[in-house]
């Protein structure tokens, strides 16, 4: 519903397809993102925190600078990219997926295929992450073109030293023609989602919390999550579950001596639930692949990785049920902005090496920590 304001912007809920019941996502119409007024900003910020994912159509001409400014609306004193310079580490699992826009270093280019020139980057080859590089067992080659997986459910966050970005923006600059794929969970449940190739999938972490039993809600409200230092290097040899929701435990994590130096004071121990700054709702917000230990209310620390991952998976899995997944079917010019502290998201799909797809992504390490359940 449009808000009573001087802004011409209107907010329209995304209608889920039949069979789907996710309760978040909205399209914002009437915004001039190159010139955001104060009252526009108010409407956009409220819409984001009420809807978690907001979509602006026809933004293909938006400059990287304007994308940066839109993203920074949510955290005006934040300045640097969400992963800082940690992606320079060649061993990080995030390294191959991102290229930095030289004149706007908070903005990254992601996608697939050969690109002659884009925003000052010349002769680059982008590579859409394929689940076979990360999952323990992959879909067979014969089935691969028509079927896919959730690549890796995550929060955009360094989870070491830097604070998790408040929002991420994603602009679809070039997308191949839409084709449909079947996304399989391959976890014995038979769960599947029909989505367009290369959809970005989102789930609400508020719904994930609401689905918990009262006992699990109490556990989630009172437990803290310790993340591994240099998590994306630490986990680099590990393989994922077939639902993309966390890692398989087979002792492959890199030991401390194989990581860059660790400063204990930079290790992140974050609440398991993060509060929405506008609605006050609690999100069950855990990066399932980066978690290393759980700190319970009674002082117990669970640091057996297999046990930690089982607990987190048991709590999170109901929240990624097929009907709760909002898969954005990208059209060129779509700009999505999402509440990185209230949703999980993942890449899906696969592309042939010559299929060109270009996205611009922006987020910034936050100027302040997450809001815990008791704050
Ligand atoms: Fe991401």
Image: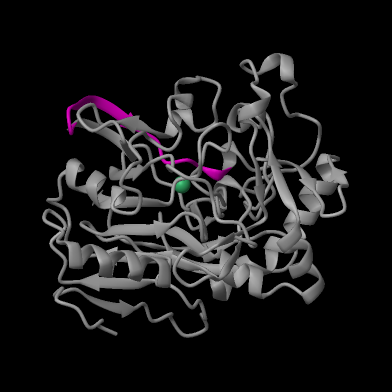
Nearest the viewer among 64 and 9 is: 9
The answer to which image quadrant residue 232 occupies is top right
Nearest the viewer among 20 and 157 is: 157
Q: Is residue 191 visible?
A: no
Nearest the viewer among 370 and 306 is: 370
Residue that appears at 15% across and 50% down:
62
Looking at the image, is 99 positioned above or below residue 39? Answer: above
Residue that appears at 43% across and 51% down:
166
The spot of residue 123 in percent (x, y) is 23, 24
Residue that appears at 39% across and 33% down:
98
The quarter of the rendered structure image containing the N terminus is bottom left
Looking at the image, is 286 positioned above or below residue 157? Answer: below
Looking at the image, is 154 positioned above or below residue 325? Answer: above
The quarter of the rendered structure image containing the C terminus is bottom right
In the rendered structure, does residue 244 fall within the stretch colored magenta? no
In the rendered structure, does residue 119 fall within the stretch colored magenta? yes
Q: Is residue 351 visible?
A: yes
Looking at the image, is 13 positioned above or below residue 320? Answer: below
Residue stretch rendered in magenta on the structure: 118-131
The spot of residue 132 in percent (x, y) is 58, 41
- Tell how many labels: 0
The spot of residue 237 in percent (x, y) is 67, 28
């Amino acid at each position: 519903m449009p808000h009573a304001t001087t802004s011409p912007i209107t907010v329209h809920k995304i209608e889920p397809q039949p069979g789907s019941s996710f309760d978040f996502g909205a399209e914002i119409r009437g915004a001039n993102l190159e010139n955001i007024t104060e009252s526009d900003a108010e409407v956009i910020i409220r819409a984001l925190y009420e809807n978690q994912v907001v979509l602006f159509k026809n933004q293909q001409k938006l400059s990287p600078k304007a994308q940066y400014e839109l993203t920074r609306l949510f955290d005006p004193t934040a300045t640097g990219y969400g992963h800082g310079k940690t992606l320079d580490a060649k061993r990080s699992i995030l390294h191959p997926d991102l290229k930095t826009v030289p004149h706007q270093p908070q903005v990254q280019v992601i996608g697939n295929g050969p690109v002659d020139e884009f925003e000052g980057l010349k002769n680059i080859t982008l590579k859409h992450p394929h689940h076979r590089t990360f999952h323990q067992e992959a879909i067979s080659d014969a089935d691969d073109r028509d079927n896919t997986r959730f690549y890796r459910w995550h929060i955009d966050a360094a989870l070491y030293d830097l604070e998790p970005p408040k929002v991420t923006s994603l602009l679809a600059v070039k997308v191949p023609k839409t084709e449909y794929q079947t996304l399989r969970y391959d976890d014995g449940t038979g769960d599947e989602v029909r989505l367009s190739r290369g959809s970005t999938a989102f789930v609400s972490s508020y719904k994930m919390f609401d689905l918990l039993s009262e006992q699990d809600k109490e556990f989630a409200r009172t437990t803290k999550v310790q993340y591994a230092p240099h998590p994306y290097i630490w986990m680099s040899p590990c393989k994922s579950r077939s639902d993309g929701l966390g890692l398989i435990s087979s002792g492959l994590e890199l030991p401390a001596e194989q990581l860059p130096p660790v400063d204990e004071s930079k290790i992140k121990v974050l609440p398991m639930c993060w509060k929405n700054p506008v609605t006050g709702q609690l999100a069950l917000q855990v990066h399932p692949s980066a978690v290393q230990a759980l700190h319970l209310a009674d002082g117990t620390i669970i640091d057996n990785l297999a046990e930690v991952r089982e607990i987190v998976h048991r709590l999170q899995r109901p929240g990624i049920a097929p009907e709760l997944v909002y898969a954005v079917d990208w059209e060129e010019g779509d700009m999505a902005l999402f509440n990185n502290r209230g949703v999980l998201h993942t890449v899906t799909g696969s592309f042939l090496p010559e299929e060109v797809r270009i996205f611009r992504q922006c987020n910034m390490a936050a100027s302040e920590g997450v809001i815990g359940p008791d704050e």
